[in-house]
Image (cartoon, rainbow, N blue to C red):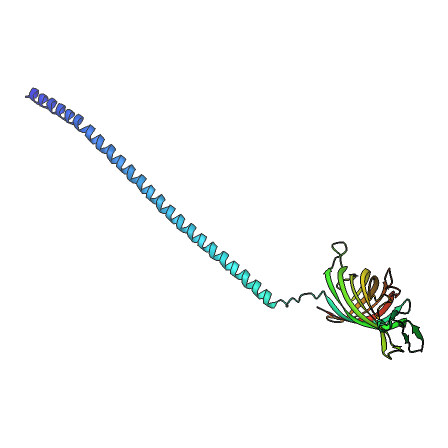
């Protein structure tokens, strides 16, 4: 009986051992698969979490960019508004009036009495002056002194003398003036009056000092004169050319209105076939800036 029992126990023990040996690999394999599945699920969850975080970061970055762009646009709009307001409040800028037109007049003195010939008496008649002097051959003679009047335009070129000196302006003056030396010479043949006169056209560079000041002294280093005389010379010439040198000053009395004074010497290298146009002028002017 005891032997049978031992044998049964031995058989049972062997059976259990064999069953355990057969079942353990399957259980181990199932446990490893479950562990791998859990790891895979955990990794997938982490990846999903990272993807969610990346989407959140991208959304936040887009929001920040939008806010920054909106802020920049707002700043630009504010700057534009401030600029427009400053332009509206700023005083109107008036363009500087650098040019000048002037009416002129004064006294003219000739170095010699202005002579000429009455063309209507060129064949040997005579003329008589106011003092009763008879001039043979149709010749007439004028006074040494006369009054002149005219106008001039100053075209301002720059205010730094071509970069050489600040505050010194360079301008070009175009002028015209008329002088009547006498109207009392009279032909004894026809009884007609003979007027001795002169028209002078000039173009001169002008250097003006103290730019920006009310008082503007100036000089004309040398300018061009064109003199037209009447009556003509003995050779029936009516025109010659010469030079002028001058100095003066302008003072701005009111805004854009100035008073001026000037003295000029006029010189011609050659006379007009015996008629001398040399002399000087002294006069004043009223100028208007434009």
Q: Give left or right: position of 260 versus 134.
A: left
Q: Give left or right: position of 84 versus 7.
A: right
> Quadrant where the N terminus lies?
top left
Residue 99 image offset from top left, x and y in percent: 72, 65
Residue 259 location, quadrant: bottom right
Residue 141 in view here: no
In the displayed structure, would residue 169 be above or below residue 56? Answer: below
Residue 252 image offset from top left, x and y in percent: 77, 69
Residue 142 location, quadrant: bottom right
- What residue do we see at 57% from left, 66% from top? 85
> Quadrant where the C terminus lies?
bottom right
Which residue is at the front of the view, 287 or 239? 239
- What residue do we see at 52% from left, 58% from top? 76
Residue 34 location, quadrant: top left
Return the residue found at the far front. 123
Residue 67 image offset from top left, x and y in percent: 46, 55
Which residue is at the front of the view, 133 or 178? 133
Which residue is at the front of the view, 57 or 129? 129
Residue 239 image offset from top left, x and y in percent: 81, 65
In the displayed structure, would residue 96 be above or below residue 60? Answer: below
Return the residue found at the far bottom. 191
Which residue is at the front of the view, 135 or 88? 135
Return the residue found at the far left. 1
Residue 226 in view here: yes
Report how many numbered discs are placed on residues in the image: 0
């Amino acid at each position: 009986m005891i032997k049978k029992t031992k044998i049964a126990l031995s058989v049972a023990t062997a059976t259990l051992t064999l069953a355990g040996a057969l079942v353990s690999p399957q259980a181990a394999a199932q446990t490893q698969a479950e562990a791998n599945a859990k790891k895979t699920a955990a990794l997938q969850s982490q990846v999903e979490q990272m993807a969610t975080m990346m989407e959140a970061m991208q959304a936040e970055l887009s929001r920040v960019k939008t806010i920054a762009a909106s802020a920049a646009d707002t700043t630009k709009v504010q700057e534009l508004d401030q600029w427009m307001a400053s332009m509206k409040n700023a005083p109107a800028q008036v363009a500087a009036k650098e040019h000048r037109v002037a009416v002129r007049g004064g006294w003219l003195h000739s170095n010699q009495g202005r002579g000429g010939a009455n063309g209507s008496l060129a064949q040997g008649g005579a003329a008589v002056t106011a003092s009763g002097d008879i001039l043979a051959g149709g010749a007439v003679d004028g006074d040494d002194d006369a009054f002149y009047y005219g106008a001039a335009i100053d075209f301002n070129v720059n205010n730094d003398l071509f970069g050489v000196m600040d505050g010194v302006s360079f301008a070009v003056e175009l002028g015209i003036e008329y002088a009547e030396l006498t109207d009392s010479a009279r032909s004894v043949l026809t009884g007609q009056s003979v007027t001795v006169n002169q028209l002078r056209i000039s173009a001169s560079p002008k250097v003006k000092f103290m730019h920006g000041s009310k008082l503007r002294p100036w000089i004309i280093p040398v300018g061009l004169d064109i003199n037209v005389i009447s009556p003509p010379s003995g050779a029936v010439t009516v025109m010659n050319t010469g030079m002028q040198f001058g100095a003066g000053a302008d003072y701005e009395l009111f805004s854009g209105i100035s008073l001026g004074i000037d003295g000029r010497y006029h010189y011609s290298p050659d006379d007009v076939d015996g008629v001398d146009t040399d002399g000087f002028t002294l006069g004043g002017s009223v100028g208007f800036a434009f």
